[in-house]
Amino acid sequence: MGELADRIDSMRVRASTPDGAITAELYDRSRLTLTFLQGWYDLCDDSDLERRLATLAQLLWVARTREYWRTFSDVAGETVTGEDTPVSSRDLDWREERDALVARGYSADGRIAVKAVGMRQWEVHISPGTVRALSEREFAEAAAQAAGELINDQLAKIAALSNKYYGYDR
């Protein structure tokens, strides 16, 4: 792998919900750890947790995107803050399709489902009764699995889209 790919693979980013109740760390491209403020998980319910995790996912992806461009800038030796301007209708079509991609991930037991449209609109669904059925650690592991699946689904769909438009994996 090249330097950029190696550094992207080793990026670590963190984000927390605005109230600090939940913190997530993303590393190794698609691995996630989730931690809760002490005692908070025992007091939450499924629907509150869904909303907070959707917000956290969005904040974590923003942090990941910022770190990606910072890393890209380091490797390029110049400040880069975003994508190049599309130069063809093919580029515009690729970007439009990318921004509409729906990525999904699920926990092994199916209790937790995550969905992202264009990695900008996030939804989390937690089956009723999950918070009471799973310990904090079990929930964190299941949520991490669903998030990892979503990221890998997104990466696979981006690769297929790049191959469709450019004949290679981007």
Image (spheres, helix red, strand yellow):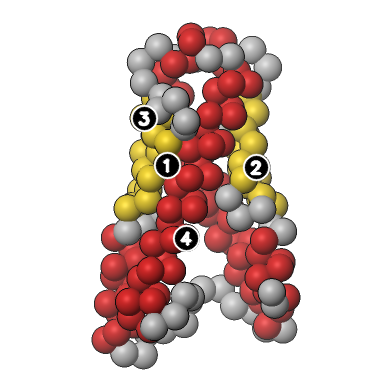
Residue position marked by numbered label 4 in the rendering: 155
Q: How packed is label 2: few (under 14 Cα within 10 Å), some, or many (20 or more)?
A: some
Question: Is the residue under label 1 in contact with that under label 4 (CB below 8 Å)?
Answer: no
Q: Which amino acid does label 2 sit on?
A: Glu
**Cα distance in 3D space between marks 3 and 4:** 21 Å
Residue at the spot x=71%, y=68% of the render?
6
Apparent side of residue 1 relative to residue 69 in the rendered image (left or right):
right
Mark toward the start of the polypeptide (3 vs 4): 3
Q: What residue type is labelled 3?
A: His
Apparent side of residue 58 relative to residue 92 in the rendered image (left or right):
right
On screen, 70 above or below 59? below
Question: Is the residue under label 3 in contact with that under label 1 (CB below 8 Å)?
Answer: no
Q: What residue type is labelled 4?
A: Leu
Mark 2 vs mark 4: in front: 4
At which x and y percent is residue 5?
65, 70
Residue position marked by numbered label 1 in the rendering: 105
**Cα distance in 3D space between marks 2 and 3:** 20 Å
At which x and y percent is residue 92?
30, 79
**Cα distance in 3D space between marks 4 and 1:** 12 Å
> Closer to the camera, 112 or 72?
112
Q: Which amino acid does label 1 sit on?
A: Gly
Apparent side of residue 110 relative to residue 139 in the rendered image (left or right):
left
Residue at the spot x=36%, y=39% of the render?
123
Mark toward the start of the polypeptide (2 vs 3): 2
Residue position marked by numbered label 2 in the rendering: 25
Mark toward the start of the polypeptide (4 vs 1): 1
**Cα distance in 3D space between marks 1 and 3:** 11 Å
